[in-house]
Amino acid sequence: MASLTKENIKGAILIYSCHKHKNTRLKEFGLKQKEYAGWKVFYLLGNPNIENEYITIGNTVLLKCEDSYIHVGKKVVMGLKYIYDNYNVAEGILRCGDDLVFLENNLVNFLNAPDKQDYMGYTRNTETKLSVKTDFFMPQYYLSHPEDFNNPLHKIPYKIEDIMKMHIVPNCKTAGGVVVYLSNKSCDILIKHFANIGWDIFTKDSKYGYPYIIEDIAVGFILYINQIFLTSCPLYLDSDMYGFTDNGFSVAIHTNKYK
């Protein structure tokens, strides 16, 4: 339920996680402050069994959403909906993973930048036209994590042999990885699109396969078909925890710790 009195904020930093990493990643990599340059920090977890649409505990938001990896797209967009239901947002959202070492000076510089675009992030995919591709990323993940099918917080309604068939996905220039910037316009499009598909990430498109089972692809696909195209920029760096160097721009280092 939306708040009747909304606080004005410049933007929100949304860090999505899961119960598996509550005592590891969230404890080790959480941001030191609850707000940076007028941008509030929120941590997202899922629990499909709660009664209300969300529960807030400090700046942690427990969403009525499956906590599984395949549902990250739904979790992130439900997190966007929570923000816009409860806050007046001037600019947009910085969507982040939970295993980042933040470079706080760079973070503040980016948040204060006046020329942010509607959709920004790092991409390895330079495909400029929308097509389809074969991608076994999600099936391979579940082959190596069979225990997820028995987790009551995950509520995956399929068996592994069904997931193995979900390997056709859209192919276009999308922001991959753990830090993505989305403007208010982009967030509004994403929220409305997920509402239109009934928040069902297993919705199959007759032409593009399964657009919503991989969050990076889901966001890029939805924005692409709404004529919002990625502005590529290195918002994060991939490296081991101790071998990185600050490039003066990226807001965080991706550690990939506690996989």
Image (cartoon, rainbow, N blue to C red):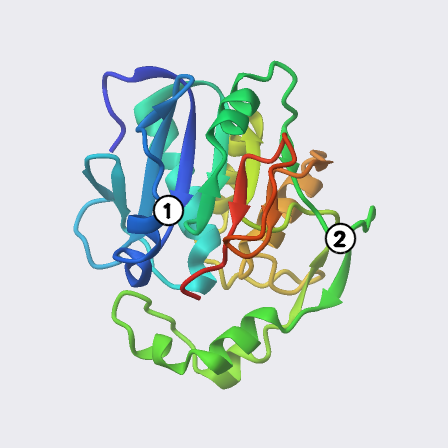
Quadrant of the drawing holding the C terminus: bottom left
Residue at 48% from the left image edge and 39% from the top image edge: 95
Q: Nearer the viewer, residue 253 or 132?
A: 253
Is 30 located above or below residue 2 in the figure? below
Q: Are marks 1 and 2 in contact (CB under 8 Å)?
A: no
Task: Please report the residue visible at 38 percent of the width from the left and 40 percent of the height from the top.
Answer: 79
Which mark, residue 66? none
Q: Position of residue 173 (x, y in %)?
A: 74, 47
Point out residue 49 in the picture as x, y percentages from the top left corner. 21, 59
Quick check: 172 above or below 61?
below
136 displayed left or right of 96: right
The image quadrant where one finds the N terminus is top left
Where does residue 174 sit, x and y in percent of width and height? 68, 47
Task: Identify residue type, mark 2.
Answer: Asn
Residue plotted at (50% across, 34% down): 103
- Characterize the local packing of mark 1: few (<14), some (14-19) or many (20 or more) Cα atoms within 10 angstroms: some
Q: Which residue is mark 2?
A: 125
Quarter of the image for residue 131 reads: bottom right
Q: Is residue 231 left or right of residue 162?
A: right
Q: Amino acid at mark 1?
A: Phe
- Where residue 56 sits in the image (x, y, percent)? 20, 38
Residue 207: quadrant of the picture: bottom right
Does residue 195 sit above or below 39 in this rendering? Answer: below
Q: Residues within 10 Å of mark 2 (few under 14, many from 20)?
A: few
Foreground disc of the pair 1, 2: 1
Q: Earlier in the sequence, mark 1 or mark 2?
A: 1
Residue depicted at x 66% and y 48%: 221
Residue occupied by mark 1: 29
